[in-house]
Amino acid sequence: MKNYILDGQYIKYFNLLGIDIKKVINQMHLPFNFFNQDNPSLSEKKYYMFMSLVGEQIKNENVPIKLATYDNVETFSPAIFTSYCSKNGESFITRLSQYKRLIAPIKYSLDKNKDNFEINIEPSNIALRIPSFLLEIEFIFLVHVIRKATNKPINPKMIITNYDFSESFKKYMSCNIVKGNFNKIIFYNNDLKVQFNSYNENMIKFLEPILYKNLNDFETDNSYKSHVQTTLINLLPAGKCAIEDVGYKLNISTRTLQRALKKEHTTFREQLNHTRKILAENYLQNTNMSSSDIAFLLGYQEINSFLRAFTVWTGKTILEYKKQIDK
């Protein structure tokens, strides 16, 4: 049975929206310091229970919309961000369906015909039922990202669901919503062919190998160093490379993060250097960016610091490394 980590960003926004997470922890009989533990994660059944209890607290029908459309929600995880860099809506959904199990116990079953692209949203375990709150967020999130990435008011063709959603949800979707025995969102093919403004093939090229590795690790490994690396991938371009920044993103204290990494026989500094090395090599192999631009994207304030570090990592200067690539 696989466990799913509760993203620290969502927990932060739950609190901002007035949801009493401590009450949910008590209701589930979890340790009072659950979110300060290493890898705060839950089985699929308990994950759904957690989301159900959160949903029970929501009295304002606009809260799910606010949660699913928060600024920069597309950067909450490397899996989402990589998908956001896709060429269009069809590629975005297809790519996200591959990585979905890294984020939550949800599965996308895709079906394309002459006119439509259908996404059936299912639990990983067919014996369970996705809570209405979680499903509502999932529907809204998909539509929000497609609208944001295209800068166009794209609406689904239809939503089929076994839940009754709010009037605010229906207004946001602006499409036909019918009752059924499954949960499906349908788009017109032409709408999903509109190119994303966020399209970045080079970003996909060097993020996807890491995500493929994470998918493999998901079957056998839930290590904290893996979460630190994937978190740093999003933080470094914003100039954030301190352990405090990663701890904030993962919703754990600096001390807890240090202890977790020590148990895995590594340190934050080692993981930072490892992540920077991977990204630097991918930038050099897949882009024509200058050394100063790469240094900036890796969170360095001075290019000389990056140049010295790169030589330590690889035993080569940037120029020597580029010559090796060109051979």
Image: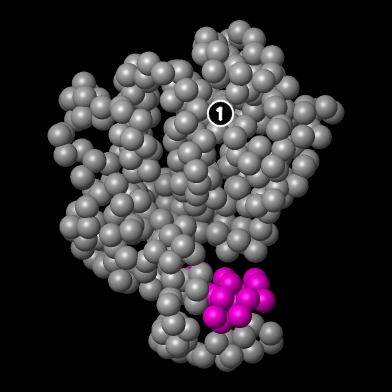
Q: Residue at x 22, y 57 (%)?
A: 254
Q: Residue at x 50, y 77 (%)?
A: 295
Mark 1 secondary-structure assignment: helix
Instruction: Determine whether 268 is above or below 19 in the image.
Output: below
Looking at the picture, tell me which residue is in the foreground, 93 or 74: 74
Q: Position of residue 308 (x, y in %)?
A: 42, 88
In the rendered image, the quadrant that contains the C terminus is: bottom right
Q: Quadrant of residue 125?
A: top left
Query: Magenta residues, as a range?
Result: 278-294
In the rendered image, the quadrant that contains the N terminus is: top left
Q: From the viewer's perspective, is 186 left or right of 307?
A: right
Q: Residues within 10 Å of mark 1 (few under 14, many from 20)?
A: some
Label 1 sits on residue: 140
Answer whether residue 320 is magenta in the image. Answer: no
Farthest right residue in view: 114
Q: From the viewer's perspective, is 71 left or right of 13?
A: right
